[in-house]
Amino acid sequence: MNTELTYDYHEKTKIEAINNNRAIIQETAKGLIEGIKSGALVEQECPVTHRFSDGIYLREIFMPKDTRIIGKIHATEHFNVVLTGRCTVITAEGITEITAPHTFISKAGVQKVVVVHEDCQWQTLHVTNKTDLVEIEKDVIVEDYDQLLVDGLLDNIKGLGL
């Protein structure tokens, strides 16, 4: 039996581009944090409201015009609802301009950079029965892509019953 190892060159190129874009987003985040710490940049206040219902956690943030937001890496798929405003969203997979009202799904592993052109009211909805914000963040946020990979492997192992 002749077996050959093959791969889709375009898919490999896409994965390499996504990984490169992830690195750029993380370096941008580090640069913004360093700028705030040094006093070169001013941290913008973005009020957040938390709401809970049966099995749902809704997080709502107000982002003023001309703000740049570096989101966290999400471990879970979830809804995003842009209620008001206009912004540009940059992820490892590309750049999208969003004008409210707009609803979309973020896949697990996505980190967003948001450039706000008009004041935005943005909601994310997460499946959970928890109401403790620290516990919720442990479930829906990862510190880096390595943690996301490890968590995914552990979930796969648990799924196999090992």
Image (cartoon, grey):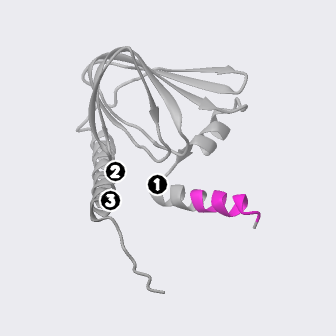
Above or below residue 65? Residue 43 is below
Name the residue furthest front.
Answer: 1
Residue shown at the point (72%, 32%) measured from the top left: 130
Numbered label tally: 3
Of pointers 3 and 2, the one earlier in the residue sequence = 3
Counting from the top left corner in percent of width and height, residue 141 is at: 54, 44
* Residue 91 position by quadrant: top left
Q: Residues under labels 1 and 2: Cα distance?
A: 9 Å
* Residue 159 position by quadrant: bottom right
Residue shown at the point (53%, 39%) measured from the top left: 77
Q: Residues within 10 Å of mark 3 (few under 14, many from 20)?
A: few
Above or below residue 122? Residue 4 is below
User: What amino acid does circle 3 point to?
Assistant: Glu
Label 3 belongs to which residue? Answer: 11
Label 1 belongs to which residue? Answer: 144
Say if the magenta span includes residue 99.
no
Residue shown at the point (27%, 32%) measured from the top left: 96
Label 2 belongs to which residue? Answer: 26
